[in-house]
Structure formats: C-alpha cells, structure tokens
Image: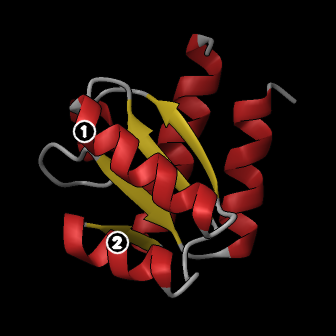
Amino acid sequence: MTAQQTVKLMSLLGLAQKAGRIISGDQVIEKALRDRKIKLLLIAADAAENTCEKYSHLAEACRIEWHVVLTKEDLGQAVGKQYRAAVGINDEGFGRAMAKILAGS
C-alpha cells in the first residue's frame, strides 16, 4: 500500500466514523459479521495471529470482503479511538470506496 493510498484510506475511515458507519470492538464486530451487517472488514497488520485468523475465517464464512491493512495504532487514529485490531464498515458506499483504494484503483 502506497503512502497516498494510506492517506486516502485513513481519511475515508475518519469520514465513515463521523457518519456513524464504523463498527469496532471485538464482540460487536463478531455479531455484525454473523448478522452480515458489515460490508468491508479491515484487520490491522499487527493484530495478534489468533485475532486475524478469527476475523478472516468469520468474514470468509459470511462472504464479507476483508483486508489486512495499516497498524492497530493507525486504525485507531483514523477513527478517533485508541488502538483497534479491526474495524468494520457497515455502509455499502464507504465499503466500495475503501475497497477501490485497497485494490489500487
């Protein structure tokens, strides 16, 4: 991921947070994944291996797109909170825009 993509992604995460379209917190994300309320799942690159495996397997089982990006500190900073191992985007538009950035388009 380039520096420009990182800046764009973090900016979009901030906008999504302000719009109330970000889900964070372990139990909340798990429930939202199972209920298929999340459109895109972002997992921190430095999250614990068990955390990454748990979220990625759950997302795949529910057919939800997921990516490993940024660090826990960066994810938290982007959404105005402390460290975040994962955040879910529950808005189709924000999810598509972030997926497009992550795809390099």
On residue 8, which mark appears? none
Kindly identify the residue that appears in the image at 54 percent across and 25 percent down. 6
With 102 as the anchor, is 74 left or right in this view?
Answer: left
Image coordinates for residue 84, horizontal then vertical, percent? 23, 47
Labelled pair 1, 2 in contact (Cβ < 8 Å): no
Residue position marked by numbered label 1 in the rendering: 50
Q: Whole-Å distance between the Cαs marked 1 and 2?
A: 14 Å
Q: Secondary structure at mark 2?
A: helix
As displayed, is residue 95 above or below residue 93? above
Q: Work out whether residue 44 or residue 63 is closer to the camera in this orientation and state it.
A: 63
Q: Amino acid at mark 1?
A: Asn
Kindly identify the residue that appears in the image at 31 percent across and 27 percent down. 71
Residue position marked by numbered label 2 in the rendering: 30
Image coordinates for residue 102, horizontal then vertical, percent? 70, 33
With 86 as the anchor, is 56 left or right in this view?
Answer: right
Q: Amino acid at mark 2?
A: Glu
Let me know if residue 72 appears in the view.
yes
Q: Work out whether residue 60 or residue 38 is closer to the camera in this orientation and state it.
A: 60
Instruction: Count residues near mark 1 (Cα–Cα under 10 Å), then give few for <14, some for 14-19, many for 20+.
Output: few
